[in-house]
Amino acid sequence: MFFANREPQDAAFLGELQALTGVASGFHLVVTMTALRESVYPRARETGHIDVAMIHRYVPEASITMYYVAGLQKWS
């Protein structure tokens, strides 16, 4: 699961999703933050928006997989 938010304190259910990482078989969580400022929360391994390069770092065979995307889109 790729999970993007602006800052950790804005991420709904982040703690619950992180807890599933070691418990749920086959569940992998990649957290990315797009607008980190001063935060009391630990830094995410990834920063920035989810893009093709990020997906391929974690899922090399991504071209043969189906994805579901949910969230807001910022239109230019």
Image: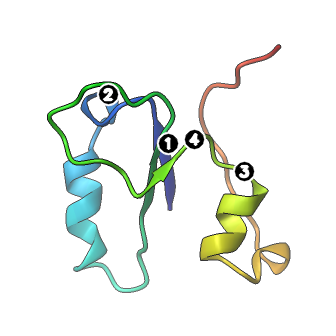
Q: Which numbered disc flags the more N-terminal residue, 1 or 2? A: 1
What is the distance, in whole Å, between disc 2 and disc 3 at their CAs? 20 Å
Query: Is 7 left, or right, of 6 in this rendering?
Result: left
The residue tagged 3 is: 51
The residue tagged 1 is: 4
Q: Is residue 45 above or below residue 47?
A: below
Using the image, tell me which numbered label, if any, was put on residue 48.
Answer: 4
Q: Amino acid at mark 2?
A: Asp
Nearest to viewer (mark 4 / mark 1): 4
Query: Is 16 left, or right, of 62 in this rendering?
Result: left
Query: Is 21 left, or right, of 15 in this rendering?
Result: right
The residue sitting at 26% across, 68% down in the picture is 20
The residue sitting at 30% across, 47% down in the picture is 43
Q: Amino acid at mark 1?
A: Ala
Tag 1–tag 3 contact (CB < 8 Å): no
- Count neighbours of disc 1 (C-alpha within 10 A) and say few if under 14, some if 14 to 19, many if 20 or more: many
Between residue 10 and residue 24, name the one nearer to us. Answer: 10
The residue tagged 2 is: 10
The residue sitting at 66% across, 77% down in the picture is 59
In x, y percent, where is residue 5?
Answer: 45, 35
Nearest to viewer (mark 2 / mark 4): 4
What is the distance, in whole Å, between disc 1 and disc 3 at their CAs? 11 Å
Quadrant (top left, top right, bottom left, bottom right) of the C terminus: top right
Q: Which numbered disc flags the more N-terminal residue, 2 or 3? A: 2
In x, y percent, where is residue 25?
Answer: 35, 86
In x, y percent, where is residue 52?
Answer: 77, 58
Classify mark 4: helix, strand or loop. Answer: loop
The residue sitting at 25% across, 30% down in the picture is 9
Tag 4–tag 3 contact (CB < 8 Å): yes
In x, y percent, where is residue 72?
Answer: 62, 25
Classify mark 3: helix, strand or loop. Answer: loop
